[in-house]
Image (tube, coloured by chain):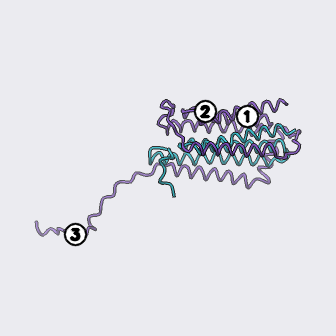
Amino acid sequence: MSVQVIFLLAFGLAAVWFGIVVFRTHSMVRSALALLFSQTAVGAMFLVMQAEFLGVLQIMMMATEMSIMAIFMVMFMMDPGGLGEMDMKHQRKLSLWAGIIAFGGASGLALFGDWGPIATQIPDAGEQVRLLGIELLGRSMLIFESAGLTILTAMIAATSIAVQPPHRPKETPDKSKEPYQVHNHGGAA
Amino acid sequence: MTLELVVTLIIAAAMFGTGIYGALSQTNLVMIMMGIELILAAALLNLVAFWRYLHPDAIEAQMFVLIVMTVMAVEMAVGFAVAITRFRSRGSVEMEEAQELKG
């Protein structure tokens, strides 16, 4: 067993364990932190697989994303600390079986698939970033620009959905349009 | 030997299964989003493993990883916007209380 496999196993088990902790703990803040650790372990696996740029990107992005998630948890939950041990699950059996079947199917494919020999030589970190930059601004530029445009659209959409609607004053009924209104023209004074 | 690839794929499968369980079993919108994040992380892991162990010369695979990361960011942004609107109008992000959204 190579050193790479040992590190992959260690970080992989950490990623899966923290992924399970996300749904086991009653505290929402702990859930967000567990997800952060899980995603960081995935980033560490990228580093073990010598994808340095993607590994660092994953860790930085997830650290920010999960911190925001923790803040939202505190904002939205009645019991973010989990002291009341609220139960927030439904359809447990169905979910458990769906998860087990998904795991079994994907593992079966991984174990019995004919993957052929694995590559031993890969471009070094600097060369990878150079090639990725050329790819992004060359053949895949349309996809890259579409991704940027998608993020911009999502930002505008998210802001428009979340913005506080303007406070409208209560409409007062227009009395001049009432059918049986008695008009006083000043003659009876 | 494909042990490295198989180990990575099995770990990704375990994360995928955990994510499916979480997305289906949780009643809170933010927790459902956490399940979806785990599913997308499993997809990322598969993409990087296939690039590293099968086609290291095809740098386009890393492009796919960037696209999946974009999807993760977009999902978070729109999901939180929906959560804010829901919390403002109903005072809760519990999906059990969102029965009126049923068609």
Q: Nearer the viewer, mark 3 or mark 1?
A: 1
Pinpoint the chain carrying mark 2.
A
- Distance from disc 2 to disc 3, alpha carbons, whole Å, reads 67 Å
Query: Looking at the picture, which amino acid does disc 2 mark?
Result: Leu
**Residue A166, percent from left and from top:** 43, 52
Chain A appears in which tint? purple
Chain B appears in which tint? cyan
Q: Nearer the viewer, mark 1 or mark 2?
A: 1
Q: Are marks 2 and 3 on the same chain?
A: yes
Kindly identify which residue carries mark 2.
A33
- Distance from disc 3 to disc 1, alpha carbons, whole Å, reads 78 Å
Kindly identify which residue carries mark 3.
A180
Numbered tag placed on residue A48 in the rendering: none
* Residue drawn at (17%, 69%) of the image: A185
Image: A83 above or below A160: above
Image: B58 above or below A74: below
Q: Are marks 1 and 2 on the same chain?
A: yes
* Residue drawn at (40%, 51%) of the image: A167
Position of A94 with respect to B57 (left or right) is: left
Quadrant hosting residue A13: top right
Pinpoint the chain carrying mark 3.
A
* Residue drawn at (50%, 46%) of the image: B96
Q: Secondary structure at mark 1?
A: helix
Q: Secondary structure at mark 3?
A: loop
**Residue A138, percent from left and from top:** 79, 52
Q: Residue A77 or A129: which is nearer the viewer?
A: A77
Pinpoint the chain carrying mark 1.
A
Kindly identify which residue carries mark 1.
A12
- Distance from disc 1 to disc 2, alpha carbons, whole Å, reads 17 Å
